[in-house]
Amino acid sequence: MPLENSPICFIGAGAMGTAMMAGLIKRNLVPPTNIIASDPSSEQLAKLQALYPVTTTHDNAAAVQNRDIVVLSIKPQTLAKVGAELQGKIPADALVISILAGATISGISRKLGHERVVRVMPNTPALVGKGISVWTHTKMVSELQKQQTKTILHALGEEVYVEDEDYLDMATALSGSGPAYVFLFMESLVDAGVHMGFSRRVAEQLVYQTVDGSVEYARQSKTHLAELRNMVTSPGGTTAAALYQFNKGGFRTVISKGIWAAYQKSRYLGSLDNNE
Ligand SMILES: NC(=O)c1ccc[n+]([C@@H]2O[C@H](COP(=O)([O-])OP(=O)(O)OC[C@H]3O[C@@H](n4cnc5c(N)ncnc54)[C@H](OP(=O)(O)O)[C@@H]3O)[C@@H](O)[C@H]2O)c1
């Protein structure tokens, strides 16, 4: 067990930090007694302690003492302040795992004065254990620490390791922001259902199960998505009529442009972080 006997600390006990702690505890990967969570909000810490018997504190510097793993689960705008508090306090051979959107490895290393850093791009389905996390690390990260990272990320869903940090900007645009695109698509389908005359409740049921079932079917059939789409598209039929309008409206182009814009934005925000 790569996490056995490795005390972990979470700086930030908000939605993502709590989801990670919950996943680790529920899967018996880390005993709650090995976890300390630091957060300025007493309310947040009380909520966490009502669920799991972890140790809590408001003192970030005290929380990282003697820890093997430090998870940064604060908002990116808090990093400079937290970095100043933690400078020289994290044990040199400890692993820092950052899930902060847009915070680059060099920015995190510099702000914390720490070299063993993993940068992760998670997404919000992680809150129900169905996330996808894309991650990379600095050269100083050991083989054991890579295994520990994988185990921690499995508590949030699936994980994909990439060698180059540029892929994290791509992942930000595709899977990080992805749930927003999917929700917008689903919302548009529900609205179209209501427009035709379904109640919102029934339209939602049809759309949720259609999306869920389509994903499961695509995974299990291992067939190219275009082929699966063709199987539903009879010549001159109803689906063909809808797809014709989608194409005419620039459906694929607008999605491609949107994701490219998100990728460029992520690169730009990363360059600001590196120059700070
Ligand atoms: N790719 C994605 O879609 C995605 C999804 C989720 C999260 N993320 C990343 O995950 C990170 C956490 O997000 P979240 O949704 O969990 O945010 P959140 O719920 O706001 O959690 C952040 C926590 O940090 C606490 N905090 C504020 N200042 C602090 C300090 N100085 N020291 C310690 N803790 C402090 C906050 O307390 P207060 O409430 O009192 O301020 C809050 O409880 C973000 O950096 C975000 O970029 C990415």
Image (tube, grey):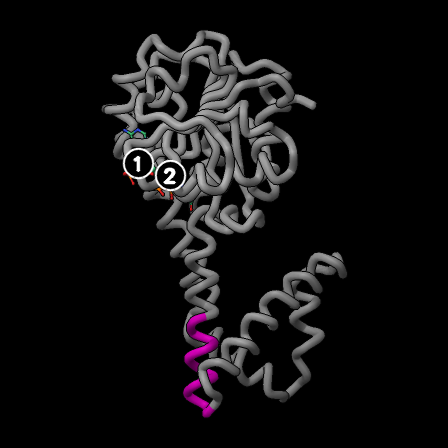
Residue matched to label 1: 42
Amino acid at dot 2: Ala
Residue 175 seen from this side:
yes
Q: Residue at x 40, y 24 (%)?
A: 105
Report the magenta residues as a range: 187-197
Q: Would you place residue 56 above or below residue 154 in this image?
A: above
> Which corner quadrant holds the N terminus?
top right
Amino acid at dot 1: Ser
Q: Is residue 210 magenta?
A: no
Residue 150 is tagged as none
**Which residue, as the protein is rendered here, is positioned at the far bottom?**
197
Residue 17 percent across, percent down from the top left: 44, 37
Q: Would you place residue 46 above or below residue 201 in this image?
A: above
**Which residue, as the protein is rendered here, is positioned at the far right?**
221
Q: Secondary structure at mark 1?
A: helix
Contact check, label 1 and label 2, Cβ < 8 Å: yes
Residue 164 percent across, percent down from the top left: 51, 28
The reply, left or right, for residue 89 in relation to residue 18 is left
Q: Quadrant of residue 142?
A: top right
Q: Residue at x 60, y 72 (%)?
A: 210
Between 174 and 36, which is closer to the camera in this rendering?
36
- Mainly helix, strand or loop, the magenta region? helix
The reply, left or right, for residue 175 in relation to residue 75 is right
Residue matched to label 2: 46
Report, in whole angstroms, how far the alpha carbon at label 1 lies from the one at label 2. Answer: 6 Å
Q: Residue at x 29, y 27 (%)?
A: 79
